[in-house]
Amino acid sequence: MRRCPRPGDPNIDWDKPIWEHDLARGLRALDNGVRTHIITSSVALGLLTERPGGLVVEITDGTNEFNADYRGNFYYDLAKVSVNRMALSLSRDLAAKGCTAVAVTPGFLRSEAMLDHFGVTEANWREAVSTDNPHFSLSETPLYIGRAIAVLAADPQVGRFAGQAVAVGTLAREYGVTDADGTQPDFERYAQDNDLSSPEIVDDAKYR
């Protein structure tokens, strides 16, 4: 069975059910992961809808299919599912204005925080790939999602993605986008094909 990985979140206590979890910290996680998106939409979309053609991109964590599996904690799970649902809801509200909303998810994002967490740099990041961290071989730089969103925004037919939660790997294949190293990491496909709870390091060549 495929299992979703459990990234770090200072407000989340993994493996604690809701009745044992600190309520204030759980609600803080929802503030960070959901409320911020709502506030931004409420304030900014009035400007976006002044003329047709606008695009809202919700940066999310996992496609709808990926998030169909429980994400390991009540608050964390709710936050991840909610952002994808926002893209669908906003797409309905924006349709009459000729604007589009879509959610885009990176795969295993090799952010500066993640590099620091594993004690590596962009130059030697592969040294962090191990049986304790096997999926890091499929990680991608923030540049990858940035490039994908840029070509998405330039596509006059972007409305075909309205309301969807799309993986960067999918957009990369659609538009020919590559990461900084010229590869096309596809963590979504990797997750579909492999058990994410396994410590086995899978050959990443066919997923890049």
Image (cartoon, rainbow, N blue to C red):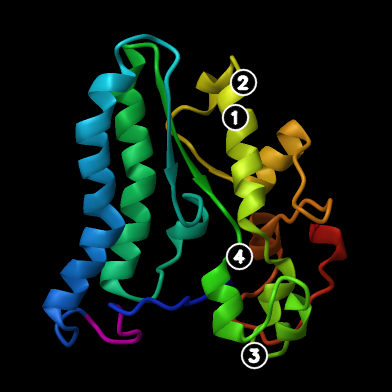
Q: Which residue is mark 1?
A: 152
Task: Give the number of callouts.
Answer: 4
Segment colored magenta: 12-17
Residue at the image point whose x is 84% and y is 51% from the top:
182
Above or below, 94 against 206 in this view is above
- Quarter of image, res 119: bottom right
State which quadrant residue 191 falls in: bottom right
Q: Would residue 185 be counted in the magenta stretch?
A: no
Residue at 33% across, 80% down: 10
| Distance between the alpha carbons at the discs numbered 1 and 3 | 35 Å
Dots 4, 1 in contact, CB < 8 A: no
Mark closest to the chain's N terminus, 3 or 4: 4
Question: Which of the two residues, 141 or 205, is positioned nearer the viewer here?
Answer: 141
Q: What type is the residue that disc 4 sits on?
A: Phe
Q: Secondary structure at mark 3?
A: loop
Q: Amino acid at mark 1?
A: Leu
Label 2 sits on what residue type? Asp
Q: CA distance from mark 3 to mark 4?
A: 15 Å
Residue 3 in view in this figure: no
Q: Gap between marks 3 and 2, in whole Å?
A: 40 Å
Q: Which residue is mark 2?
A: 155
Is label 2 in contact with label 1 (beta carbons under 8 Å)? yes
Q: Looking at the image, is mark 2 or mark 4 earlier in the sequence?
A: 4
First in sequence: mark 3 vs mark 2: 3
**x, y percentage for residue 113?**
52, 73
Quick one: 64 or 128, which is closer to the camera? 128
Please determine whether, in this image, residue 79 is positioned above or below residue 168. Answer: below
Q: Position of residue 48 (x, y in %)?
A: 33, 21
In which quadrant is the N terminus drawn? bottom right
